[in-house]
Image (spheres, rainbow, N blue to C red):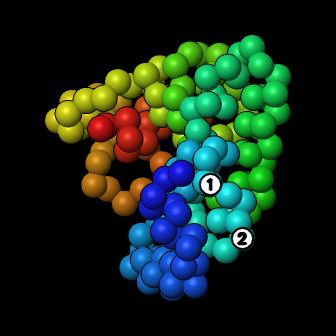
Amino acid sequence: MNPLQAALMSNADKTLGQLAKLKDLGIQILVDDFGTGYSSMAYLKRFPIDTLKIDREFIRDLSSDPDDRAITRAMIGLAHSLNLQVIAEGVETRDQLDFLQDEHCDRAQGFYIAHPMPGSELLALFRAAGEGLGQDLGERQPSLFGRGIVPSRRTLQ
């Protein structure tokens, strides 16, 4: 059990108030490793969440396991029906990325997309792709990889 998640759930009313204050400041709230451990659908109902991050456990065998495909498809559909963004972590093959794109996953991260890199290399990657950092993107997300799938911050760590 993730100690932070346990702490958040142990005093849900206080947590809800603190998360609301963060949202008021424009900070987006993400549930990491969704579908495993202490992550719960109660988060989706109770807390002001913006994004679900699907754990790599469900991504790893997408090409060969129909159960992983069904679960991942359901998580993406559930998140979108609640107007949440979805990030899939641990994408290591083209087949995985193709599946996620076909299911309209919003973002993906993993070694297939990019290995961890210093910020200066990331900036060069964005510049080479013709995307500017620091510009107001509005609803548009920078996309190096087509169809809206982009590396997320953990890729940079």
Please tell me whether mark 2 sits on a helix, a strand or a loop.
Answer: helix
Up the image or down, 48 lies above or below 143; here it is below
Indicate the position of residue 42 as horizontal and vertical percent values: 71, 66
Question: Mark 1 falls on what kind of element?
Answer: loop
Q: Is residue 69 left or right of residue 48?
A: right
- Quick check: 66 left or right of 130? right
Bin the neighbour count of mark 2 within 10 Å (Cα to Cα): few under 14, some 14-19, many 20 and up: few
x, y percentage for residue 126?
31, 35
Comes first in the chain, label 2 or label 1: 1
Residue closer to the observer: 116 or 105: 116
**Image x and y of residue 54, in percent:** 61, 42
State whether residue 103 is above or below residue 78: above
Kind of residue indicated by mark 2: Lys
Identity of the residue drawn at 53% across and 63% down: 6
Q: Is residue 148 visible?
A: no
Few, some or many residues within 10 Å of mark 1 (<14, 14–19, 20+): some
Mark 2 → mark 1, Cα distance in angstroms: 12 Å
Number of numbered discs visible in the structure rendering: 2
Q: Nearer the viewer, residue 41 or 27?
A: 41
Q: Which mark is residue 45?
A: 2
Q: Give the residue at x 61% y 54%.
A: 38
Residue 116 against residue 28 in the figure, above or below? above
Can you identify the residue that label 1 sits on?
A: 39
- Considering depth in this image, is 98 or 10 the residue closer to the camera? 10
| Three-letter residue code for mark 1 | Ser
Residue 97 horizontal/vertical position (percent):
60, 25
